[in-house]
Amino acid sequence: MSERFHRIPTPGLCRDCRQPWKYAIDPFRIAPHVWCVGSNVDVGMFLLDTGDGLALIDTGMAEFFYLLVDGIWRAGFDPRNVKNILLSHMHGDHVNGARYLQEMSGAKIWISSEDDAFRRRAKLHFGMEIPFEADAWYDDAVPLALGRFSVRTRLTPGHTPGTTSFFFEDRDDDTGKTWLVGMHGGAGTDLMRPDVLASEDLPQTLAHRFVRDCAALSSIPVDICLPSHLNQINLVANIPADRRDYTPYIDRTVWPDFLAERAAAVRAFYPETYGTAAAGR
């Protein structure tokens, strides 16, 4: 991975969510028809211009929902045209705007059946405060047909039991080039620590599944990596002066290196399974 895309510490918006204006940024384009519209330096929210309405991956927290709405407008779109909300996993910093946006636009809410069940039994609730009902569950065998996009989902548990990752091709209308876009739905590793999993009555097999999935997913030739938190690939520092220019994010080394770093962090929690040397690789 290019040095400029190395992971940096989280900026802390989720711990300081009562003052979201301190973390506000302008929206920017990250793929030919994809915009990062969360308008904050922390949680990633990605707007897909499908050519037949809009789709949004993740909706952020209630406290900075206004930044999301403003970001969609300033990117040149109407939030009332969002038809589909694709949730990556059932944590409050990713889902607490879903009901608000659905009430505004009538959008259909998607999530994995595993995480829909998880939120009903979770002890910690992970900041899930704004109730909503899922309209549909992902089926990894059936891509989501969303206008110009065919979005392939893949269950990638670990961060939650039903974390879902997304893959789709996006064609540049001007150049004719097509880029593969990928997003791992949840790569925060601390929730895969043995003590945290035990506190939720979740098995350690989730952590080991995450490690295996990272290895398998790394072979997918992703051209543009969408991070669920922008610090994961130091995205903010790499926004170009022209915020419509997505080309700086085209880098096939980012995806596999990002997954390798995240898998190594989880292996380090289980030296008895992977060994000290393996955890550090």
Image (cartoon, rainbow, N blue to C red):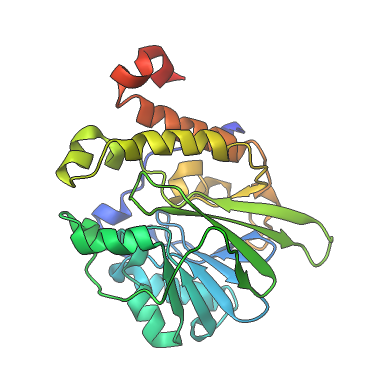
Left or right: residue 69 versus residue 175 is left
Residue 204 or 146: which is nearer the viewer?
204
Establish if 271 lies above or below 210: above
Q: Position of residue 270 (x, y in %)?
A: 30, 24
Furthest toward the right, the residue is: 175
Q: In which image quadrant can residue 81 be found?
A: bottom right
Left or right: residue 45 versus residue 201 is right
Q: Position of residue 97 (x, y in %)?
A: 35, 72
Establish if 278 lies above or below 43: above
- Identify the residue at image location x=40%, y=71%: 67
Total marks in image: 0
Can residue 120 be seen? Answer: yes
- Identify the residue at image location x=60%, y=81%: 53
Establish if 100 lies above or below 57: below
Can residue 6 be seen? Answer: no
Left or right: residue 53 versus residue 104 is right
Q: Position of residue 36 (x, y in %)?
A: 53, 62
Establish if 265 lies above or below 130: above
- Identify the residue at image location x=50%, y=37%: 214
Residue 47 or 204: which is nearer the viewer?
204
Furthest toward the front, the residue is: 141
Residue 117 or 232: which is nearer the viewer?
117
Q: Quadrant of the N terminus?
A: top right
Q: Position of residue 104 (x, y in %)?
A: 41, 86
